[in-house]
C-alpha cells in the first residue's frame, strides 16, 4: 500500500520569480488520526499549517516552514516533501516518487505554499494511491462484495418470481408485469455496479461512459419503483382499470424525478472518488428530497382512499392485502426517516472520516431497504391461480353477482306473492261456487 507521484509539475507567475534564493512548495501526507501533529496556533487563535511570525517569535518554529511534530506511533510521520523554485525558474518538476504506507487508516495529501508571493500557482500531474487489494479507496472497497451479495439476492428473487410467473401465465395481471420489470432492472443495476467497482479496483480509473450508464439504469429503476408503489396505492388494476386523468400527472412526476435523480447521481459518482460536498451537491439533493417527500404524501393519500373504497365494497381479500401493504410502507418510511437522522449524525460527528470502515453501509442501507420492500410487494402480489380475484374486472363480477342474488331473492318473494294471490283467488272462487250451490239447494228445497 502506498502513494506514488507521477509527472508532477508546478508553475508560478513570472512576477513571483527571484534573482536569487529558493522558494519551497511543501507536500504533506498524514493520517487523519495525526492531524494535530500538523500546524499550530499562537495564543489559542486560528490554527495555521505554516509557521507565522507570532509562532516564530515564540520560538516554536521557523517562519515560512511547515509546522510538523513527529507522530506518537511513527516518528517518520507525517511525511513532508519539499520542492523548490530556484532563482528565476518558474517551474518545479517531480517525475516520480513513491511513499510507502504500512498502516491502515484515512490519509490526507496537502500541497502547501507558505510564501505569500506564491499565488495562483498551477499544478499538473497525478498521484496514485493503491491498497493491497487494488485501487479502490478503503471506504469504497466493501461495495465490491456488497454488490455480489445483492446480485445473488436479486437472482434468487427473480428465479422464484419467474417460476410463479411462467406457471400461472394465463392469470398474470398487468401489475405483475410491472413488478417483473422492476426486478429485472434491479438485477441489471446490481450487476453493472459490481463490474464498475471491479473495473475501478483493477485500473484505478472510473470511465465516464460506464459510470454514466450505471447511474442512468439506477435512476430509471428508482423512478419505475416509485411509480409502481404510487400506482398500487391508487388501486391500479384492483379498484380502477386505469389511472384515467391522473396518468399524465403520474408520468410528469416520473420524468421530473428521473431527471433530478440522474443529475444527482452523475454529479456524485461520474469521474469522482469521494462524495461531492458543498453547495453544488446541496442544490441537487434538495429537489430530489422534495420530490421524494411529495411522492410519499401522494402515496399515503391515495392509499387511504383505496382502503376506504375497498372497505365500502366489503372486498375482504383485497382489503387484507392493502392493509399489509400499508403496514410495509409505514415501516419503510419510518426506517428511512430514522436512517436519515443517523446519517446526519454520522457525518456531523465524523468530519475527518475516521470511521471510514463503516461509512459504506450508509449508502448500502438504501439498496437493502428498497430490496426488502420489493420482496414484500412480490409476496403480496405473487402470480397464482387466484390472481384474477384481485383484478378490477372481478369487482364488476362481484357487484353483478350481488345484484343477481338480490333479483333472484326478489323474484322468489314476488312469485310467492303471486302464488298467494292465486290461492286467494281460487279460494274466493271456491267460496263463491259453494255459496251458489247452497243457494241452489235451498231453491230446490223450497
Image (cartoon, rainbow, N blue to C red):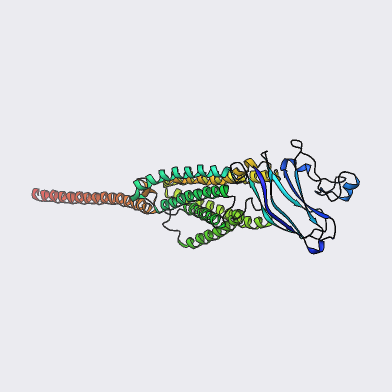
> Total marks drawn?
0
Above or below residue 296? Residue 74 is above
Query: Of residues 39 and 348, which is closer to you in this image?
Result: 39
Q: Position of residue 366 (x, y in %)?
A: 56, 46
- Residue 166 visible, this orientation: yes
Q: Position of residue 341 (x, y in %)?
A: 64, 45
Q: Name the residue at the top extreme.
A: 73
| 261 sits left or right of 424 in the view | right
Which quadrant of the rendered structure holds the N terminus?
A: top right
| 85 sits left or right of 176 in the view | right
Q: Position of residue 304 (x, y in %)?
A: 51, 50
Query: Of residues 127 and 258, which is closer to you in this image?
Result: 127
Quadrant in which residue 236 is drawn: bottom left
Above or below residue 72? Residue 286 is below
Q: Position of residue 48 (x, y in %)?
A: 81, 49
| 257 sits left or right of 68 in the view | left
Q: Name the residue at the right extreme.
A: 57
Q: Residue at x 49, y 48 (%)?
A: 191
- Residue 334 visible, this orientation: no
Q: Name the residue at the left extreme.
A: 444
Quadrant in which residue 338 is drawn: top right
Amino acid at each position: 500500500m502506498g502513494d506514488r507521484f507521477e509527472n508532477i509539475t508546478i508553475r508560478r507567475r513570472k512576477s513571483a520569480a527571484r534573482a536569487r534564493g529558493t522558494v519551497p512548495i511543501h507536500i504533506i501526507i498524514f493520517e487523519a488520526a495525526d492531524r494535530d501533529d500538523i500546524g499550530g496556533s499562537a495564543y489559542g487563535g486560528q490554527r495555521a499549517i505554516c509557521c507565522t511570525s507570532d509562532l516564530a517569535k515564540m520560538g516554536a518554529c521557523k517562519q515560512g516552514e511547515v509546522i510538523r511534530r513527529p507522530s506518537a506511533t511513527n516518528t517518520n510521520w507525517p511525511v513532508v516533501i519539499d520542492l523548490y523554485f530556484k532563482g528565476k525558474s518558474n517551474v518545479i518538476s517531480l517525475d516520480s516518487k513513491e511513499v510507502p504506507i504500512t498502516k491502515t487508516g484515512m490519509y490526507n495529501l496537502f500541497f502547501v505554499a507558505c510564501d505569500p508571493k506564491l499565488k495562483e500557482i498551477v499544478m499538473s500531474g497525478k498521484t496514485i494511491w493503491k491498497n493491497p487489494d487494488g485501487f479502490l479507496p478503503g471506504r469504497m472497497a466493501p461495495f465490491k462484495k456488497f454488490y455480489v451479495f445483492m446480485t445473488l439476492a436479486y437472482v434468487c428473487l427473480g428465479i422464484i418470481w419467474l417460476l410463479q410467473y411462467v406457471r400461472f401465465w394465463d392469470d398474470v395481471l398487468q401489475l405483475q408485469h410491472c413488478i417483473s420489470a422492476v426486478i429485472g432492472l434491479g438485477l441489471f443495476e446490481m450487476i453493472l455496479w459490481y463490474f464498475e467497482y471491479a473495473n475501478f479496483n483493477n485500473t484505478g480509473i472510473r470511465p465516464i461512459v460506464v459510470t454514466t450508464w450505471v447511474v442512468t439504469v439506477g435512476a430509471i429503476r428508482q423512478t419505475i419503483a416509485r411509480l409502481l408503489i404510487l400506482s398500487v396505492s391508487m388501486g391500479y388494476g384492483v379498484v380502477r382499470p386505469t389511472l384515467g386523468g391522473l396518468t399524465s400527472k403520474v408520468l410528469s412526476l416520473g420524468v421530473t424525478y428521473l431527471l433530478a435523480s440522474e443529475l444527482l447521481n452523475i454529479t456524485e459518482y461520474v469521474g469522482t472518488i469521494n462524495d461531492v460536498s458543498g453547495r453544488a451537491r446541496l442544490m441537487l439533493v434538495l429537489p430530489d428530497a422534495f420530490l421524494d417527500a411529495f411522492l410519499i404524501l401522494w402515496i399515503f393519500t391515495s392509499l387511504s382512499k383505496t382502503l376506504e373504497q375497498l372497505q365500502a365494497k366489503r372486498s375482504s381479500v383485497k382489503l387484507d392485502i392493502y392493509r399489509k401493504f400499508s403496514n410495509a410502507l409505514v415501516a419503510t418510511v419510518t426506517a428511512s426517516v430514522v436512517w436519515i437522522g443517523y446519517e446526519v449524525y454520522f457525518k456531523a460527528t465524523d468530519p475527518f472520516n475516521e470511521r471510514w470502515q463503516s461509512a459504506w453501509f450508509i449508502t448500502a442501507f438504501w439498496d437493502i431497504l428498497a430490496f426488502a420492500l420489493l420482496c414484500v410487494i412480490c409476496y403480496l402480489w405473487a402470480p397464482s391461480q387466484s390472481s384474477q380475484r384481485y383484478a378490477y374486472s372481478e369487482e364488476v363480477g362481484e357487484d353483478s353477482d350481488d345484484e343477481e342474488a338480490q333479483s333472484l331473492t326478489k323474484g322468489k318473494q314476488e312469485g310467492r306473492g303471486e302464488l298467494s294471490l292465486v290461492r286467494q283467488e281460487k279460494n274466493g272462487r271456491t267460496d263463491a261456487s259453494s255459496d251458489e250451490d247452497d243457494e241452489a239447494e235451498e231453491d230446490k228445497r223450497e
